[in-house]
Amino acid sequence: KHTITIANKTLGQSCLIHETIRIKSGAWDDSGVFVYSTLNHIKYALFQGDNGIIQTLDQPVYLTRVKGKTIYCLDRTARPRTINIDPTEYRFKLALVQNKYDEVLNIIRTSNLVGQSIIAYLQKKGFPEIALHFVQDKKTRFELAIECGNLEVALETAKAIDRPESWARLAQQALKQGNHKVVETAYQRTKNFDKLSFLYLSTGSLDKLSKMQVIAEKRGDQMSKFHNALYSGDVKARIAVLKDVGMLPLAYLTAKTNGLEDLAEHLLASAGIQESDIEGLDSISASTLRPPPVITPTANLLWPSLATDENFFDKALANGHVTDYINGDGAADGAHTLDSWEAGEPDGEAADGAEAEAEEGEGWDLEEEVVEPDATHLNAAQDVVPEDEGDAAAAAPGVPEPELWARNSPFAADHAAAGQFESAMQLLNRQIGAVNFAPLKPQFMALYRSAHVWFSPTASVAALQLHVRRDPEVRLPVIRRTLASIKAGELAEGYRFVAGAKLEEAATAFKSILLMLMLVTVSTKEEAADVGSMWQPSERKMETDRFS
């Protein structure tokens, strides 16, 4: 009497709704919503568990049928009567569940469905961007814009609200997205000078740091003056601040450690002492306390963000009509949701979640083994990129640089530089019949190390890896030994050993040349013929040395 259990035709439980007041009756709406009555309310229940109040009753009624906006029922005297209701709220929620966005848009346009309960429902279900289209309250729009990451709307409403807490939240959200221009605006509105100075330091805006130092001078904030002088590397300004606050010893040490001898002597004179009067002072070494030089200013650069298409509601509100694509797909999705629920299959949200998990696993290929490229892939000159398939495809990571090296080259040296030693061995086996790769291990490792660079921008950040190309416009790795360097170096040395009758040294030199020739790259037919001509004399000289 206090619980409603909704099940499908196989009696699989879909949801369980508990009421504190006794339930009197219930009937199904023609759209698939269960409408029921209690002692003083008419309520609704969706198949996935959402419920709410439709109307308040003066006297209990017993429902017999629900059609459109009319409820047919019996009162306590068993007399039939009809009650007009407003089904907008539960039809709006049902359209969201069924992905019928055309119906959602129509309800937004034609009804006064605005209230904190609907807004809270949209936020709970993950649709804050929908609420933005029909919410006029500035504070509510700001909260929704922050939640869905819409900085443009958030900035507009923050200017209208103009409260410190709103600017602080906007700055925090903009920092997460790397939009430091919005962060700068928020800090300027709240006069957060300390954070503003640090922002200019991190973006390399030295001219704005100088302006912050002037502002700190006008404000009379000595600590802010010192921070800005430290950020901008202005040693004399730091000394001036220390002198103004009466810290002459620190000012003297700062001048001394930065090589400003004249200024240090002036500070001693102003204090009425000489350097010989200072006792217990250890030898002073040069100071390295200064910010690193700005290589690439990022004041006009924002973090790259994923390019998202205009959503359905933006397009529909701008065009004044619903697109056919959404109209057809939304209805099909909704029908599929109801049919699957009735058949005992997972509901729409669960099915979508399972599909999303499957797509995520397929996108990353978590369970698949890494397959080395075959000859077809090795001869491919371009990387084939699949067409975009929605937001998931747009957010997919790009192909790693070393993998492109292996795809774009048929040379074992490029595969070894990419770290794909297995495919490099397969190539050598097919091209020259190599079977014992132990002598090539040092060559493989040298090729890999020479094509990659690791550097740490700051001490607290893990080392970053860069892939070195032999040409900025060509996606191929740099190769440490070229054909020209081998001819000018090892080959010439081998000839000198032969001319000097040093046969053992000559044999060692020509063996190393053979190993190097296995891992060189050529770009023309002449270079390929030159490699072949070097290969044959090296083999003949090794045979001569072996039988002599």
Image (cartoon, grey):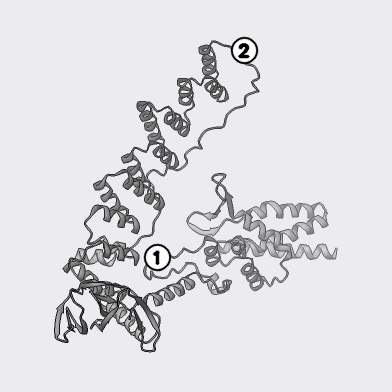
Q: How far apart are the alpha carbons under marks 2 and 1? A: 71 Å
Depth check, front residue: 247 or 58? 58
Numbered mark located on residue 201 in the image: none
Which residue: 22% across, 83% down? 62
- Look at the numbered disc 2 and give the secondary structure of its residue: helix
In the picture as drawn, the residue positioned furthest to the bottom comes out as 10
| Disc 2 packing (10 Å; few <14; some 14–19; many ≥20) | few
Residue 99 located left or right of residue 546: left
Which residue: 69% across, 64% down? 535
Q: Point out the tag, 2 or 1, that comes first from the N-terminus.
A: 2
- Look at the numbered disc 1 and give the secondary structure of its residue: helix
Identified by mark 1, the residue type is Ala
Numbered mark located on residue 277 in the image: 2
Camera-nearest label, 2 or 1: 2
| Residue 324 visible from this viewpoint | no
Which residue: 60% across, 14% down? 275
